[in-house]
Amino acid sequence: MTRTLTVLAAGPLTTVQDAGRPGQAALGIGRSGACDRVSYALSNRLVGNAPDAAVLEVTFGGLGLRADADLVVVTTGARCPGSIAHNGPVELRAGAEIRLGPPATGLRTYLAVRGGIAVDPVLGSRSTDILAGLGPAVVANGDVLPVGALDGQMPGVDLAPVADPAGDDVTVRIVPGPRRDWFPDEAWAILAGQTYQVTSDSNRVGVRLEGEPLERSRTGELPSEGMVRGALQIPPSGKPVLFLADHPVTGGYPVVAYVVDEDVDRCAQLRPGQALRFRG
């Protein structure tokens, strides 16, 4: 029997993601990959996949799937009400369906299937980069997703005791960026002292924030320079943009700070209207 998953409902945004395309920024190719790397890694561990196996990244629930063979699946990240348990592997019989509702907290849910999602890789990765248009197409209703061959042993874990993403204020650590000197000390105090609101313009490229604008101490613009995940870029509006997985490779606005790398995954679970604070 063919090992596949049929998409009954794709939800607001579902993409295939893996560990991304590292080391190709000099060629103008961003890494992309799972936005919440911690939840992604956990999903693969729970079903015995390789650490770079491809999974489904589900934004705000809404996903419906049918197993076309006996499969083992798991969800991690944002907890969606639905037909399967969370943070623990589940055996699906051929013909069984999965339905994920909208999560109470968090934004992105990771659904891993034992064997991995085996769509064709592009430039060494199965990740969908929505900014560059690389990788497999965004998952759509009626898609039939191939599942890879079994490789490795199940870990024998029934449930991972992992906390759900925060639904209230989130505080993350920052360190000065390469263009900190483009801003006066007062701007740094504002950045580290106020509460920002996540806007609805946020996506896999970055989290756009609403709050008191940061004024520059310099005039003019920068030549385009390299950008990385976790950068806090300040466009002319003065309102920060926090770059996530599908960030551009270069940018011309000053980067005042970086979010500490291990805190960026928590930012991937922020939803519109949620509050974010920076601690310098």
Image: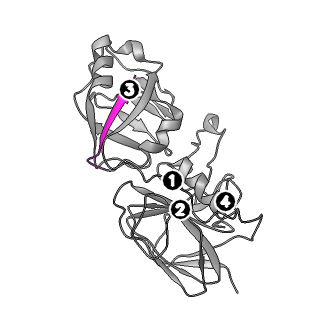
Residue 235 position in % (x across, y down): 33, 29
**Circle 2 residue:** 87
Q: Is residue 139 above or below residue 205?
A: below
| Crowding at mark 3 (Cα within 10 Å: few <14, some 14-19, many 20+) | few
| Crowding at mark 2 (Cα within 10 Å: few <14, some 14-19, many 20+) | many
**Circle 3 residue:** 279
The disc labelled 2 sits on which kind of residue? Asn
Q: Is residue 197 left or right of residue 233?
A: left
Query: Which comes before the other along the chain, label 2 or label 3?
Result: 2
Circle 1/circle 3 CB separation < 8 Å: no
Of badges 4 and 3, nearer the viewer stands 3
Circle 2/circle 1 CB separation < 8 Å: yes
Q: Is residue 5 above or below residue 27?
A: below
Of badges 2 and 4, nearer the viewer stands 2
Residue visible at 58% across and 39% down in the picture: 28
Residue range of the region highlighted in magenta in the rendering: 272-280
User: Relative to the observer, which residue lies in front, 273 or 240?
Assistant: 273
Q: Is residue 254 above or below residue 63?
A: above
Look at the image and say whether residue 277 sits in the magenta stretch: yes
